[in-house]
Amino acid sequence: MNMKENLSRERTFYEDYPDYTRPLLEISPRTRERLLGRLEFLYGLEAAERWMPELERILNVHHAHKPPEMLEKEEKYNPEHRFCQDHILLITYGDMVNGDGPTPLSTLHRFVDHYARGAINTLHLLPFFPYSSDRGFAVMDYRRVDKRLGSWKDIRNKKSHYDLMFDAVVNHCSSGSEMFLEFLNGNPAYRDFFIAYTDPNELTDDQRRKIFRPRTSDILTRFETIDGPRYVWTTFSPDQVDLNFRNPAVLLQVLDGLLFYIRKGADMLRLDAVTYIWAEPGTESVHLPQTHEIVKLMRDVVDLVASGVALVTETNVPHHQNISYFGNGCDEAHMVYNFALPPLVLHAFYTGNTEALSLWAEELYPPSNQTAFLNILDTHDGIGLQGVRGFLPPKDIEFLVDRAREKGAFVSYKTTENRAEEPYEINSTWWSALNPEHEGESLDLQIDRYLASRAIALVLRGVPGIYIHGALGTTNDYETAKVSGINRDLNRGIIDAREVENELKDPASKLSILFSRGREQVRVRRRESAFHPGGGQQVRHLCPHVFALQRTSPENDSCVLTLTGVTGQAVRLEIMPDKIGDSRDRYLDLLSGRTYSANDGILHVELPPYGRIWLKGVC
């Protein structure tokens, strides 16, 4: 099996209109029984049989948009080849770059093409739909591109060069959306689209205490309707009203929307806040069996009519709960965000000790070769802390928060079951979280520290995702955050394309050095089969100050030992060949090109401050 065959993927596009002269989709009795079983689990047999024809209609409509070459390609698709070492995501908003393009989306395309082409293969475009708040995550219209950003034509142009990840904001919509306005107007078709009470006390104090809250706002928000006041379930903010998945019509509309996104170019679908989509008073209303069943149904639908598209669950929760969305490795998410990674990497660099990171990484195995972790360090939100709860002790999490604050970070909170507040995420750019602004350190040392931290996300088993501000090493944007009053805006500033161009003209500038060194380690990762997400991984405990990880290709024909220093001191290592997984006498550092020779069977390596060495045996 040649794992490199997926490195150059032919891009095919759905037809704009369905062609019903071709045969309809063939659904096997076994598949139909499974789909019906999912609906029965959620709604009972009678409702499942009533709604099953609508699900089949949606699937057939999607199928009719496929050109013959796409059908032929899908017949040859092997799900084990969905991810490879070539996959690296760039995460960005559609209007994050200010430049000379006719639309913000076209400006972004030019910017990425100029600076990142050859370093990434996938663009994660954060919500680009019309919205009313939360930087795109209070969606007003799920099927239109925000005219302030561009059009579907801009999205298609990007699809010509990159795989694309879209956000599927499935938990909630804007209170200004047409759906919710129809609810307020008493339209019977939308009466049950939202979770609403006539009296807020219908949700008892005991029930409220049990609900897991990612925010400190009230769970219910009052709205005036044609039928009088209604108190609506709002997990995230008063402007973000939760959809009621107890209503089968909501689920079917969401499934239809996911397939619409796929037809518009989505190769990956990020299921935003999927943890919360089934609300059940009297429980925490997270990770419920119904939630997992809905994700399984989404997986069934995608595998049936859009093979090759990956579902990515965004569940910023403790690690053991997060990985539960893999299911058995073949029936839920293809990929989950590795939310424990950012705080653990910060912990390693703040303490100069990798023991916690190494112990966690030893257990980091996806459940099948059809799944992968999305290894992120920074995102548009911040550095979440939920992923390490239950792994790092509370005093260590408090230490992370305090150190980040010392470096200028803000902190966002959530409400606990006892109605207290606890830190939910650190708000900061990744550069500012790592590097002090006024401590007199050299720029070289700060860049080495920064690239060492990013190297960990590149070498871990999985697919790296890099936020655009992380790629540029941006510092905290205090001015924007002050104006908006939103902590997360520290990490969401607008990038001026001309300023980037001017800084890159100076070879001694921070950005020039960061780009030249950072792009090389990305390129090495992309061409080395040992970093394939389906390959092997073994943590080597060589020294507390060094994160040592051995990676092996799926075919076992390539092995690399990666060494990452997390302190500002040089570290001397004596490495036995069995720790490398390759008993040769000579080794090549893939990053620097330097060779090392074993002496009496021992490899002597000196790792400079915040050094990175990737060793591979050579003849």
Image (cartoon, rainbow, N blue to C red):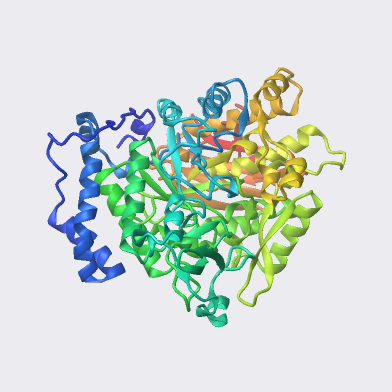
Q: Quadrant of residue 556?
A: top left
Q: Is residue 185 visible?
A: yes
Percent across and percent down for residue 279 are 45, 69
Percent across and percent down for residue 565 are 68, 44
Percent across and percent down for residue 399 are 75, 61
From the image, which quarter does the N terminus lie in?
top left
In the picture shown, does residue 298 fall above or below 90? below
Closer-to-camera residue (554/68): 68
Q: Is residue 199 left or right of residue 544?
A: left
Q: Is residue 545 visible?
A: no
Kindly identify the residue that appears in the image at 25 percent across and 71 percent down: 44
Closer-to-camera residue (27/432): 27
Closer-to-camera residue (392/488): 488
Number of disc labels? 0
Kindly identify the residue that appears in the image at 78 percent across and 54 percent down: 405
Percent across and percent down for residue 391 are 60, 65
In the picture shown, does residue 10 fall above or below 238? above
Residue at far top of view: 505
In the picture shown, does residue 200 fall above or below 431? below
Closer-to-camera residue (156/121): 156
Kindly identify the residue that appears in the image at 54 percent across and 45 percent down: 136
Q: Is residue 447 left or right of residue 548?
A: right
Q: Is residue 129 left or right of residue 354?
A: left
